């Protein structure tokens, strides 16, 4: 069971409790699932009971107990324990590997990972002024709304309901991709920067980091094929240390397997959060949320790259195949997100 699936299972339990009259609350849009904190147990935990306690008019511990009974019956969950003031802690079935399960889900769905039915059948009518940024934002919103089974229409006229701060000048000289990013990455109330910074190929440029991360993933896949192996979800660790410095061209001390766990943990969260981000971007007409999320994914996957390919005389192992699968999953999210923003995801950069 992936964190996304567990979050859905938690929300399903809340809906059942509301339907049965045990809780009188509005079902939230999301249930945050994280690693257990101090005093917790199992693989994952959620604070949903604390979140619902006040609107339900019941103590958090009681809300947790109501949900515990329903969650304990869910497929993929071995045990549910209430700790502290009302934290729900989950132990998953022994055969479940949450990272491998998430990677498989992304591989199966491809660039449609995160698509859902949050706006099922709804028509979102956008009225925009005759201004280039408004047109570009509306165009992206149409694509993003479609990922949630909705349909957006665009027209000009009053009253305007989508009016981001206009661009101070024509972004066309930046080129298609950089112009799109310059207009979509800032929040609607922020004034976009139409500068050559969006063309600079260095870490200070968020667009470069996103496109570079995708191109590096594609490069890793090509290099792995030359070495005779392909991606396969599975265990990500081996018993041998990895000299990540050699892979990065630095003189840093060798990094070892515990570093892999830290890197994976940092990447797992934004990958699992991608469906929620798409839903939020669609419901709030906010492609900037997706753009900033892609930066988060790119920044989280970049540290994984030195661990993916075998070094020196090292032979490709199951761990290398699993790391490649995880990197490719991040690349899929980046490619899908860039496409929704109308930006090319390069194979080479």
Image (spheres, helix red, strand yellow):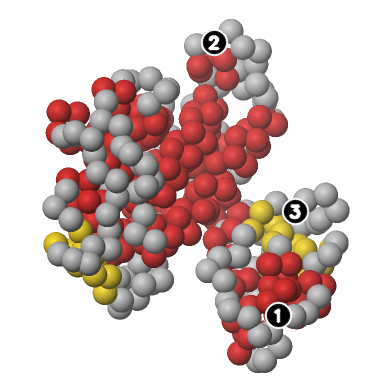
Task: Tell me how far mark 3 sits from mark 2, CA to CA.
Answer: 35 Å
Q: Residue at x 30, y 27 (%)?
A: 198
Residue pointed to by mark 3: 36
Location of the N terminus (image quadrant): bottom right
Q: Residues within 10 Å of mark 2 (few under 14, many from 20)?
A: few
Q: Position of residue 220 (x, y in %)?
A: 40, 30
Do callouts 2 and 1 mark residues in contact (Cβ within 8 Å)?
A: no
SS assignment at label 2: loop
SS assignment at label 1: helix
Between residue 75 and residue 155, name the one nearer to us: 155
> N-terminal of the two: label 2 or label 1?
1
Q: Position of residue 342 (x, y in %)?
A: 23, 46
User: Which image quarter: residue 314?
Assistant: top right
Residue pointed to by mark 1: 56
Between residue 33 and residue 100, name the one nearer to us: 33
Residue 250 has which mark?
2
SS assignment at label 3: loop
User: Which image quarter: residue 63?
Assistant: bottom right
Task: Tell me how far mark 3 sits from mark 1, CA to CA.
Answer: 24 Å
Q: Position of residue 6 (x, y in %)?
A: 60, 65
Q: Residue at x 26, y 22 (%)?
A: 196
Q: Is residue 68 above or below residue 83?
A: below
Task: Tell me how far mark 2 sits from mark 1, CA to CA.
Answer: 55 Å
Residue 263 seen in the current view: yes
> N-terminal of the two: label 3 or label 2?
3
């Amino acid at each position: 069971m992936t964190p996304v699936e567990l979050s859905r299972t938690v929300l399903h339990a809340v809906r059942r409790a509301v339907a049965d009259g045990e809780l009188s609350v509005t079902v939230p849009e999301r249930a945050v699932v994280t690693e257990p904190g101090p005093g917790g147990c199992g693989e994952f935990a959620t604070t949903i009971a604390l979140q619902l306690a006040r609107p339900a008019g019941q103590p958090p511990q009681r809300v947790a107990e109501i949900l515990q009974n329903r969650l304990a019956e869910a497929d993929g969950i071995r045990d549910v324990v209430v700790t502290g003031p009302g934290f729900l802690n989950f132990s998953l079935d022994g055969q479940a590997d949450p990272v491998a399960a998430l990677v498989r889900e992304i591989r199966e769905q491809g660039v449609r990972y995160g698509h859902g039915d949050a706006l099922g059948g709804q028509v979102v009518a956008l009225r925009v002024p005759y201004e280039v940024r408004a047109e570009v934002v509306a165009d992206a919103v149409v694509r993003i709304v479609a990922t949630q089974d909705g349909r957006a229409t665009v027209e000009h006229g009053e009253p305007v309901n989508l009016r981001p701060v206009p661009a101070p000048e024509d972004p066309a000289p930046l080129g298609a991709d950089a112009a799109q990013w310059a207009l979509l990455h800032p929040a609607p109330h922020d004034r976009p920067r139409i500068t050559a910074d969006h063309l600079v190929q260095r870490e200070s440029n968020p667009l470069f980091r996103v496109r570079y991360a995708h191109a590096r993933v594609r490069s890793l896949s090509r290099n792995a094929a030359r070495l005779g192996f392909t991606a396969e979800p599975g265990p990500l660790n081996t018993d041998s240390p990895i000299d990540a410095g050699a892979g990065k061209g630095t003189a840093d001390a060798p990094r070892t397997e515990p570093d892999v766990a830290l890197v994976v943990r940092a990447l797992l969260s934004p990958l699992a959060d991608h469906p929620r981000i798409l839903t939020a971007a669609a419901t709030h007409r906010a492609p900037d949320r997706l753009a900033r999320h892609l930066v988060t994914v790119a920044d989280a996957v970049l540290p994984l790259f030195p661990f993916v390919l075998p070094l020196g005389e090292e032979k490709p192992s199951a761990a290398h195949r699993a790391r490649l699968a995880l990197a490719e999953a991040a690349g899929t999210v980046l490619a899908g997100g860039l496409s929704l923003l109308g930006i090319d995801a390069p194979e080479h950069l």
